[in-house]
Image (spheres, grey):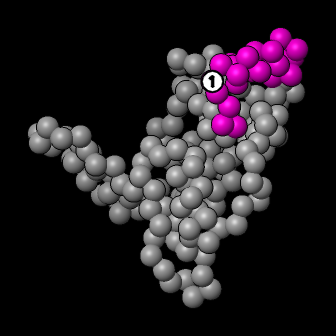
Amino acid sequence: MCRRQRLDHPEALRDLASEAGLDVRRFGIDLGSTATLEAFGADLEASREPSGKAPVLPRAGFRPLREDGEGALVEVAPGSGYESWRAAALEAGAEPVRVERPTVAEAFARFGRLAGAELLELTGLPEPVLMAELWAGAREWRYRAERSLTGFLWEPAGG
């Protein structure tokens, strides 16, 4: 959306699903499902209710990693920060690949293009420190900033 791509037809969405590494066949089935359309319609109706209350966002989370597949869903509230998601994943049985947060360079190496807010969450750096590092990297041609909506998308200069 931030690049104003036309995403108003299934083929464009399938192309993006492929780029994101999703199972395109499964995504196509879900995309064409009436259940998906009905769930979207229900969410849309709930957001239009004149109750004066903000719509309640669904909770997301992780299922415990048990061989029998049983166990309660470990939930995380929408808008929760990195630490909440990490704690929920660990509670569900995930094992961390590493304990410390990535550096800016490591975050780019793993994820490629990132928004400033994503870099803040990933690195845990204070915003002024992160911005100073990004702009210094841009000055040295290590990082590239692309203006997008009200901020920037960042990526390695070679990316």
Does residue 131 lie above or below 57 as drawn? above
Q: Is residue 155 magenta?
A: no
Query: What residue is rendered at 68% in x and 31% in y?
Result: 125
Looking at the rendered structure, the secondary structure element under dot 1 is helix
User: Where does the image place residue 67, in percent across and percent down from the top left?
Assistant: 62, 86
Left or right for 151, reference 131: left
Left or right of 105 in this view: 21: left
User: Mark 1 — residue?
Assistant: 127
Stretch of the chain drawn in magenta? 123-146
User: What residue is rendered at 46% in x and 38% in y?
Assistant: 8
Of 31 and 152, the residue lying toward us: 152
Q: Residue furthest bottom?
A: 68
Res 90 quadrant in image: bottom right
Q: Is residue 137 magenta?
A: yes
For the image, the number of numbered tags is 1
Residue 127 in the image: state x and y as whole percent.
63, 24
In the foreground, 65 or 19: 65
Residue type indicated by callout 1? Glu
Residue at 47 percent across and 46 percent down: it is: 80
User: Is residue 14 at least partly visible in the picture?
Assistant: no
| For residue 137, above or below residue 81 | above
Snapshot quadrant of residue 112: top right
Q: Is residue 42 above or below residue 110?
A: below
* Foreground pick, 40 / 80: 80
Q: Which residue is depicted at the point 82% across and 34% down? A: 105
